[in-house]
Amino acid sequence: DWSPDGLQVIFMSDRTGNMELYVLSLLDGSVTNVSNHPAADGDPAWSPDGNRILFISDRDGNPDVYVMDADGSNVKRLTDDPADDIHPQWMP
């Protein structure tokens, strides 16, 4: 998913043996793990202002929707139910 300013791309990868979220800077080519958690994280979506990221994680034992700041800080779970929650999207 492209950041709103077009300068970064967020993607999922299991390059470390665990599905994580990474941000690729198109300015310098750097790649940063922004989820950095032992649980599987995926389905990232940038907020329209580029400051936050919605994503799915099973860090509490079941796929739920989470939000975090674009740098990976301030992670908060938004859903908490026994169903698998997937593909979160922002409203414009």
Image: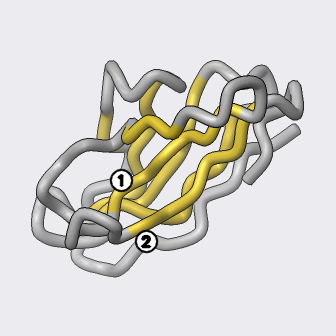
Picture quadrant of residue 51 = top right
Where is residue 32 shown, x and y percent of the image? 44, 35
Residue drawn at x 22%, y 76% is 82
Residue at x 88% of width, y 33% of height: 6
What's the amino acid at mark 2? Answer: Asp
Residue 59 marker: none
Residue bearing the label numbered 1: 79
Q: Is residue 38 left or right of residue 47?
A: left
Q: Quick check: 62 left or right of 34?
A: left
User: In the rendered image, which quarter contains the C terminus?
Assistant: top right
Q: Would you place residue 18 above or below residue 47 in this image?
A: below
Rendering coords of residue 78 (x, y %): 38, 44
Q: Secondary structure at mark 1?
A: loop
**Where is mark 2, residue-wise?**
85
The reply to whether callout 2 and callout 1 are in contact (CB within 8 Å) is: yes
Q: Residue at x 43, y 52 (%)?
A: 21
State the count of labels: 2
Position of residue 80 relative to residue 15, above or below, is: above
Marks 2 and 1, how far apart in space? 8 Å
Indicate the position of residue 28 as horizontal and vertical percent values.
68, 26
